[in-house]
């Protein structure tokens, strides 16, 4: 370990690992600090991702793919089921993130990044207004480490950005408060992601059952903080399990938060950039943040390295624009659609499910489903059109 | 009687660390940066807390509690 690095990445999730890797690949010195003992553990995730989302960064590998997904099953409040199939090119996966995150970190290491676990970052160093390093605790000792740029990839619990003066806390209504069980003996199809909607299962959010092979599955839900005020995610999950799988052996039980909003207004400042959940780069409609976090991380890592190599610190601030162009703008549209769907009544979900079922099975595309779902919301239709056109 | 002091009056929020999953949801919504979360350790920075309750509403597993009497130390 050196006394000083070009770049410090805080947090070794998918976003941090990609930031570290894309920076290190350009030959600058990088260290990634992770507070937990292990990279990739504990896992707080439903683990679903599209194949395209994976392939952009790493060769798909059966060691961390638990299920190959070609179908969605949407379950309306009255239990009307709508099944959608997509072709193999649009395949999705359910991952074993415990291994996946580890492998991502290894790609960063291979590119030349240093990694240190059990290193809890608890403050920033400043040179005037510019961030120039971090304070951290490692094995009980308080230390300091200098760097030209700090990349905050510290997840939903991010505080690093705040210390640099960026507004990063998220409105409690936009925080999807989640619980999830990984259970055994769950008879589900290994090629299908199941989504349940309605006020009894997950108001202002959705409930998911994602297969992980061998009849195991991730079963969980997210509800908005506004719902959590009245009833917690845990209470909804316990009810669902009691109703559907009362005797299922429970392999893990986790809590988690998904920031489901537009990206923060500002995700960079002198000497610092925010990536992944820390920047609120989650797709607000699906709650998926693995792929978008990796994209955010890769963009920031690359730009940060360029800023250092060309000795133009101001170049880092072009990251905001680059992100908005790639995904940020699209997330703003997704967020409006999400807000529309949040307001649907159970009756409306039921009606939509029944009208989708009238579309012949082979003609049901995700685009058609959305159009049908939003036929009574013309304003949202425009948004949907934008999503599927770009 | 001695109470923990919050930014606005007595501290009325407490986290039950034995039940906490250290997921960070509460940290993400706290407007005052008043929650410290390490690997498996969590506490409220009393002097920053304003008793706004947002962390309680966001906790997925009900481990933050509101106590009108304030928390006795
Ligand atoms: C219940 C649940 C289900 C989900 N399901 C899906 C899904 O099916 N598909 C999908 O795409 N996404 C899903 N998500 C979202 C996804 O998990 C996140 O968006 C993704 O993990 C974000 O990656 P990240 O690298 O930004 O942050 P994280 O993966 O959270 O990594 C952040 C890292 O930073 C570390 N850290 C934090 N603070 C510090 C500090 N001060 N010092 C040092 N290290 C620190 C943390 O320990 C952690 O390792 C789900 C989330 C939840 C909670
Ligand atoms: S009550 Fe409000 S200020 Fe206090 S810790 Fe909770 S969210 Fe933060
Ligand atoms: S939201 Fe609840 S479970 Fe999660 S860290 Fe905060 S107190 Fe613990």
Image: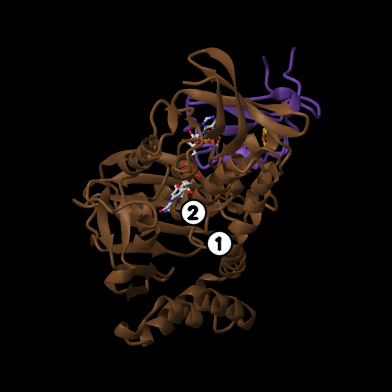
Chain colours: A brown, B purple
Answer above or below: position of B30 versus A3: below
Please determine whether, in this image, residue B37 is positioned above or below residue A356: above
- Residue at horizontal 77 percent and vertical 24 percent from the top: B10
Q: Nearer the viewer, residue A199 or A188?
A: A188
* Above or below, comparing residue A325 to residue A2 in the picture: below
**Which residue is disc 2 drawn over?**
A295
Number of marks in the rendered image: 2
Question: Which residue is disc 1 drawn over?
Answer: A327
Disc 2 chain ID: A
Q: Position of residue A203 (x, y in %)?
A: 53, 59
Label 1: how many residues lie within 10 Å, few (<14), some (14-19) or many (20+)? some
Q: Is residue B17 in view? A: no
Label 2 vs label 1: CA separation? Answer: 9 Å
Q: Residue at x 58, y 80 (%)?
A: A381
**SS at badge 2:** helix
Disc 1 chain ID: A
Q: Earlier in the sequence, mark 2 or mark 1?
A: 2
Q: Position of residue A116 (x, y in %)?
A: 44, 25
The answer to whether one can see residue A379 in this image is yes
Asked whether A97 or A297 is in front, the reply is A297
Q: Position of residue B7 (x, y in %)?
A: 79, 28
Q: Is mark 2 within 8 Å of ligand 1?
A: no
Q: Residue at x 55, y 59 (%)?
A: A284
Asked if marks 2 and 1 touch (Cβ < 8 Å), the reply is: yes
Callout 1: SS: helix
């Amino acid at each position: 370990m050196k006394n000083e690095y070009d770049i410090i990445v805080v947090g070794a999730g998918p976003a941090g690992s990609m930031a570290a890797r894309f920076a290190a690949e350009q030959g600058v010195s990088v260290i990634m600090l992770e507070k937990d003992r292990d990279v990739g553990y504990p896992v707080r995730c439903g683990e679903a991702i599209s194949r395209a989302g994976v392939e952009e960064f790493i060769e798909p590998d059966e060691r961390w793919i638990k299920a190959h997904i070609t179908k969605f099953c949407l379950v309306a409040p009255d239990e009307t089921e709508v099944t959608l199939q997509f072709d193999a090119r649009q395949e999705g996966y359910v991952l074993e993130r415990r291994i996946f995150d580890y492998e991502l970190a290894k790609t960063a290491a291979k590119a030349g990044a240093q990694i240190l676990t059990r290193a809890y970052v608890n403050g920033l160093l400043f040179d005037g207004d510019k961030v120039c390093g971090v304070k951290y605790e490692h094995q009980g000792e308080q230390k300091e480490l200098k760097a030209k740029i700090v990349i905050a990839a510290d997840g939903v619990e991010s505080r690093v950005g705040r210390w640099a003066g960026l507004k990063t806390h998220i409105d409690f209504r936009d925080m999807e408060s989640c619980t999830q069980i990984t259970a055994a003996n769950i008879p589900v199809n290994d090629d299908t992601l199941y989504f349940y909607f309605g006020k009894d299962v997950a108001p202002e959010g959705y409930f998911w059952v994602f297969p992980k092979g061998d009849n195991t599955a991730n079963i969980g839900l997210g509800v908005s903080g506004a719902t959590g005020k009245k009833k917690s995610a845990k209470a909804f999950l316990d009810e669902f399990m009691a109703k559907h799988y009362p005797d299922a052996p429970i392999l893990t039980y986790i809590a988690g938060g998904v920031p489901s909003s537009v990206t923060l207004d500002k995700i960079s400042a002198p000497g610092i950039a925010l990536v992944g959940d820390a920047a609120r780069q989650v797709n607000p409609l699906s709650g998926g943040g693995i792929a978008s976090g990796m994209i955010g991380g890769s963009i920031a890592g690359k730009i940060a390295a360029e800023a250092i190599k060309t000795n133009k610190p101001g170049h880092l601030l072009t990251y905001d624009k680059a992100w908005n162009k790639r995904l940020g703008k699209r997330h703003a549209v997704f967020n409006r659609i999400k807000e529309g769907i949040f307001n649907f009544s159970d009756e409306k979900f039921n009606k939509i499910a029944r009208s989708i079922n009238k579309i012949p099975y082979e003609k049901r595309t995700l685009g058609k489903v959305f159009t049908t779902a939003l036929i009574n919301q013309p304003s949202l239709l425009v948004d949907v059109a934008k999503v599927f056109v770009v | 009687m001695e109470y923990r002091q919050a930014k606005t009056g007595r501290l009325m929020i407490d986290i039950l660390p034995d039940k906490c999953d250290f997921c960070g949801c509460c940290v993400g919504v706290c407007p005052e940066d008043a929650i410290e979360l390490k690997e498996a350790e969590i506490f409220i920075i009393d002097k920053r807390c304003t008793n706004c309750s947002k962390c309680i509403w966001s906790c997925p597993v009900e481990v933050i509690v509101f106590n009108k009497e304030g928390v006795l130390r």
